Image (cartoon, rainbow, N blue to C red):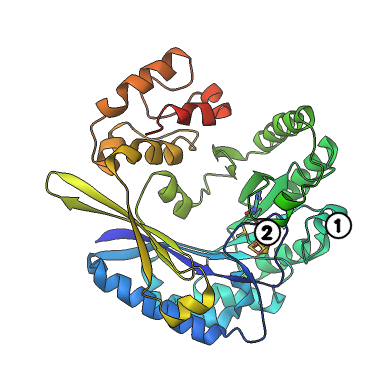
Amino acid sequence: MEPLAVYVHFPWCVRKCPYCDFNSHPLKHTDNFAAYCEALWRDWQQQHNDADLTQHTVDTVFLGGGTPSLFGAEHMHTVLDRLGIHSATEVTMEANPGTTEHASFADYRSAGVNRLSLGAQSFQDEHLSKLGRIHQAQDTLSAFEQARKGGFDNINLDVMWGLPGQSVDEALADLNTAIALGSEHISWYQLTLEPKTEFYRRPPLLPVEDTLAAMEKYGLELLAEHGYERYEVSAFARQQRYCQHNLNYWSFGDYVGIGAGAHGKLTTSQGDGLSIVRTQKASQPRLYQQDSALTQNYPVKEAERPLEFMMNVLRLVQGVPRQLYSERTGLPWHTVQASWQRLEKQGLVDPERCATTPLGLRYLDSVLAEFMP
Ligand SMILES: C[S@@+](CC[C@H](N)C(=O)[O-])C[C@H]1O[C@@H](n2cnc3c(N)ncnc32)[C@H](O)[C@@H]1O
Ligand code: SF4
């Protein structure tokens, strides 16, 4: 049986954060969670049949959003039951600290969720307020404590840095709080201004380059000092508690995506080569619920595969063995050999593995530019 990664999207939030470009919509009283869960079920059944996934067992599940924790444990139980996740090794759920009824952590745990990802963002109320968050620092601290009591021994904290008006000390104080909580994993994201967001339309004053460089330098040192291994650009794990689901994305693996706007990627043999197709569901929850079969298919052309592959695997600090390139893209290594040699001469990539050097990781955008079709 082949292992399968499944992403499930929950498209609602209490309020839209001004920096966020995820497919998330402010919750209205007419939105119906039970109907949405039914649509997820139809979507799953259809994709399962179409792609003949009977030879696969679900290995990792990521319940992402939006804010999945708005749905409550009972709906989550139904969704997970129908996916048949009994074989899954990792089932992650994203939770906004402002939406978790603490009593329900144990219920999420019994529904099959075994990894929690809390959107802390910052531990300073002033910054949370500027980010338009619905929660305060104290909410994250108590959600964390209650999650531990509810049986979660694998918790990620999302923390952002480079916030409007943030000083180096404030960014490091946020990391120190996350470290003191002792989460198994920290996702430490630099705030970016994404098109189609409120922050993009009306940009806040962000820290200057020198301040950002200092935040990054000292932040990376602090995480390392406390045993958080950087294994991907923004992902840090203690005691090898890596996110298995994301490792599959970063290894250019396949996955099924269900839910409004969810993406998937499926590879099949075709003659001597491989066919790689990316899928995307309708983004609007209402449209998705009307017809969960509605899917856009985007075949990944051979010319696009080198960049797509490198964009994922070179985010991993250790990269991947070279042979994975041909296994996952269906192309021989010599299709990237010339680019690789140029980058190697500049000290940006590893001579043996398909990986960057520490310098290459710092200048990842320039490295990736070599693989543009
Ligand atoms: C889907 S959200 C996580 C769960 C939940 N919706 C929440 O915000 O609490 C994924 C994470 O991406 C990060 N993120 C979102 N927009 C970002 C941006 N513009 N720049 C950097 N990180 C961002 C945040 O840390 C956020 O927690
Ligand atoms: S709560 Fe999370 S998904 Fe929702 S708008 Fe804010 S950052 Fe985006």
Quadrant that contains the C terminus? top left
Question: Taking 117 as reference, is 300 left or right?
Answer: left
Give the image quarter of residue 4: bottom left
Quadrant containing the N terminus in the rendered view: bottom left
Left/right placement of residue 39 relative to residue 336 reads right
Where is residue 346? Give x, y as percent: 48, 14
Q: In the rendering, at what x and y percent does residue 323 appear?
A: 28, 34
Residue 236 drawn at (x, y percent): 59, 43
- Which quadrant contains ligand 2? bottom right
Give, as a three-letter code, the residue at label 2. Answer: Gly
Q: Can the viewer see residue 78?
A: no
What is the number of the mark on residue 58?
none
Q: Is the distance from the Cβ of mark 2 to the nearest ligand 1 atom less than 8 Å?
A: yes
Q: Is residue 235 above or below residue 118?
A: above
Q: Give the crowd class for mark 2: few <14, some 14-19, many >=20 residues within 10 Å.
A: many
What is the residue that sits farthest to the top in this orientation? 345
Q: Which residue is mark 1?
A: 125
Q: Which residue is mark 2?
A: 119
- Within 10 Å of the Cα at label 1, are there few (<14), some (14-19), or many (20+) other Cα atoms? some
Of residue 37 and residue 350, the one placed in the foreground of this image is: 37
Extreme residue in the left direction: 271
Would residue 139 be found to the left or right of residue 327 on screen? right
